[in-house]
Amino acid sequence: MRCPFCGSVDTQVKDSRPAEDHVAIRRRRFCPSCSGRFTTYERVQLRDLVVVKTSGRREDFDRDKLERSIRIAAQKRPVEPERLDQMISGIVRRLESLGDTDIPSKMIGEIVMEALARIDTVAYVRFASVYKNFQAADDFDKFVSELRPTAPAEPTTE
């Protein structure tokens, strides 16, 4: 593994342990050249996924991009980072197990929203506002009103 500080390829693993609910291996590394310390994660990748954008453009699936967008949506919310790690790993496993390497971006967005809705409503609304490209406050109001359960009708006494 190349040192991110000095570029040396002679780095040493000092500690390895399971991470993300045993889905990844966390390795603490040390660079003897510059004495730098850094962490790497090793994950199983079942297949190379390609995201098909709504414009038809194709790009390689980027787990880090998915993770950044989810963490931004959940920022300052009472959600444990480990819970988000588990959710992200679950989403990636689900995408890899679909059987197809070409995944529409719309499907990824729907899967993420479904997962966030189970964890935190505010994070779900934040993600949806970007995913669905809300343009005005009315868009938020309409979306949030769809989340609220409707009150049962008052019984009439006639």
Image: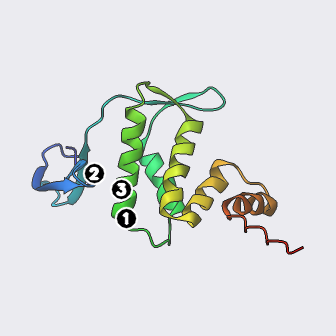
The CA span between labels 2 and 3 is: 23 Å
The CA span between labels 1 and 3 is: 6 Å
The residue under the point 39% across, 41% down is 92
Q: Residues within 10 Å of mark 3 (few under 14, many from 20)?
A: some
- Position in image of residue 111 (x %, y %): 51, 44
Disc 1 and disc 3 in contact, CB within 8 angstroms: yes
Disc 3 element: helix
Q: Which is closer to the viewer, label 1 or label 2?
A: 1
Image position of 57 with respect to 115: above or below: above
Q: Which is closer to the viewer, label 2 or label 3?
A: 3
Q: Which residue is mark 1?
A: 81
Q: Residues within 10 Å of mark 2 (few under 14, many from 20)?
A: few
- Position in image of residue 8 (x %, y %): 19, 46
- As rendered, which of 100 and 76 lies closer to the eye? 100
Query: Quadrant where the N terminus lies?
Result: top left
Which residue is the extreme one toward the right?
158
Disc 1 element: helix
Precedes in sequence: disc 2 or disc 3:
2
Q: Is residue 138 visible?
A: yes
The residue under the point 10% across, 51% down is 12
Q: Residues within 10 Å of mark 1 (few under 14, many from 20)?
A: few
Position of residue 25 in the picture relative to residue 90 (left or right): left
Q: Which residue is mark 2?
A: 4
- Position in image of residue 87 (x %, y %): 40, 53
The residue under the point 11% across, 52% down is 13
Disc 2 element: loop
